Image (cartoon, rainbow, N blue to C red):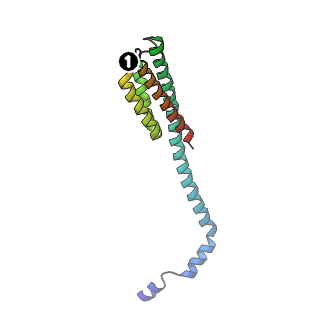
Amino acid sequence: MIARFKRNWFNKTWFLQQLRLNFVALISLTTAIAGISYNTWRDHQNEINDNMRNAAFEVLTDLGELQTIVNYAHFQKDSTLGNPIEGWKHVVMVRDLSHLLKPEAAKAANNLYGNWQIHWENLNTDAQAETLISAQISETRKAVLNTIDSLK
């Protein structure tokens, strides 16, 4: 009996008949699983892109405000509108949000933070400090715009 069971445990005829009878159902099941898998992946990708896009727009806003502070501090010598201490909040926000972007944008934001850390105190008196900070703001802006352009 055991030998007979081992020999006949798989009935090829029955299996092929079931395959023929349920072919449409199997194709439907395969299609449904593939569709759900793709939708899950696409939703995840859309969420990542949405987060990156929102972070990029926030970073661009902060970069614009930081550039305004730099311009008022250096060119107008206005300590109210060009208060370098106010610039710190924008520089820190840019650095923190840039971690949600592409590595190039994060690197540019870290470089901006480093330049600001070194030169912020001399911003209203040293032309080189303004030039270095403004150039780094521009470089960071380009990296953020490249991130936006790369989104799918």
Q: Secondary structure at mark 1?
A: helix
Q: Between residues 22 and 124, which one lies in front from this camera angle?
A: 124
Establish if 11 lies above or below 44.
below
- For the C terminus, give its image quadrant: top right
Residue at image x 38%, y 18%? 122
Q: Position of residue 73 (x, y in %)?
A: 44, 15
Q: Position of residue 12 (x, y in %)?
A: 55, 81
Q: Left of 114 or right of it: where is 40?
A: right
Residue that badge 1 annotates: 122
Q: Between residues 31 and 65, which one lies in front from this camera angle?
A: 65
Q: Quadrant of residue 29?
A: bottom right
Please indicate, yes or no, whether residue 26 appears anywhere in the rendered image: yes
Tell which residue pokes out farthest to the front in this image: 128
Q: Amino acid at mark 1?
A: Asn
Q: Left of 115 or right of it: where is 51?
A: right
Q: Position of residue 19 (x, y in %)?
A: 59, 73
Establish if 103 lies above or below 25.
above
| Badge 1 density bin: few <14, some 14–19, many ≥20, Cα 10 Å | some
Establish if 7 lies above or below 86.
below
Q: Between residues 97 and 35, which one lies in front from this camera angle?
A: 97
Residue at image x 55%, y 41%? 150
Please indicate, yes or no, whether residue 1 appears anywhere in the rendered image: no
